[in-house]
Image (spheres, rainbow, N blue to C red):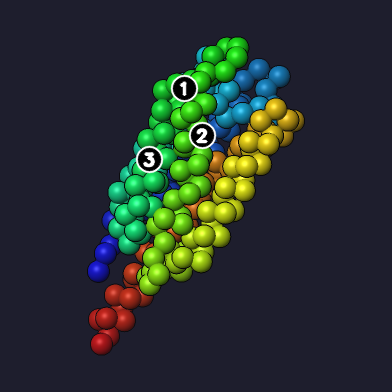
Amino acid sequence: MERIPSWAVVSSVAAPVVLIGGWTLAASLQPRGYDSIRDTISALAGHGATDRWVMTAALAGLGACHATTALGLQPAKLPGRLILAAGGVATVLVAAFPQPVAGDAPAHTVVATVAFVALASWPIFAARRSAISRLLGARIGTVATLGLLGLVTWFAVELHGDYRGLAERTAAGAEALWPLAVVIATRRSLAREAVSLTGQ
């Protein structure tokens, strides 16, 4: 029976903690003009940010967490795990290619887009027809991907709006929480299956 190792549980728990904790701490260090509803997470790691290392480290840590979770999520289909890992690598590259003080950085835009799309798309590719966990089933995987892509689309629509910070945080937060939900649900299903097999 395929298992999810404890270190993958740790990485899935750490992902939303690192992300939300990172943006909260980094935002608190900014001048009073920074607005979390309006301004992006990337601005906290950009060259013009105060103590930009905080959000840079958080993004790098988040990406590493996603890649680690993908490695340990063995009950999921391999294509989904690879896409989750790719989203993690792209998130690390978001930290490696920060926004400039003024204007846009094409490399940052590309890797951020790849990260958002990959982290929204992996559930549908990870789904199995006879999944041990409902969250790895085809129906819920499809709903999860559509919902996450919907949040990413909201962020894209708000890129020049007054709520881009809120939209980005909602999308990124949901993308960080979904692997945790899948890991917890799958571990519970595996535990029940193990008890059932032991009792036979």
Residue 190 location (% of width, % of height): 34, 69
The residue lying furthest to the bottom in this view is: 200
Q: CA distance from mark 3 to mark 1?
A: 16 Å
Q: Secondary structure at mark 1?
A: helix
Q: Which residue is mark 1?
A: 107
Q: Position of residue 145 (x, y in %)?
A: 53, 53
In this view of the protein, can residue 129 be seen by the observer? Answer: yes
Mark carried by residue 86: 3
Residue situated in front as seen by the camera: 145 or 95: 145
Compared with 65, 27 (above or below) is above
- Residue at 64 percent across and 38 percent down: it is 155
How far across and how far down the image is residue 156, in percent?
A: 63, 36
The amino acid at mark 2 is Thr
Q: Which mark is residue 113?
A: 2
61 sits to left or right of 20: left
Quarter that holds the C terminus: bottom left
Task: Tell me if 155 is positioned left or right of 10 in this view.
Answer: right
* Residue 161 image offset from top left, x and y in percent: 73, 30
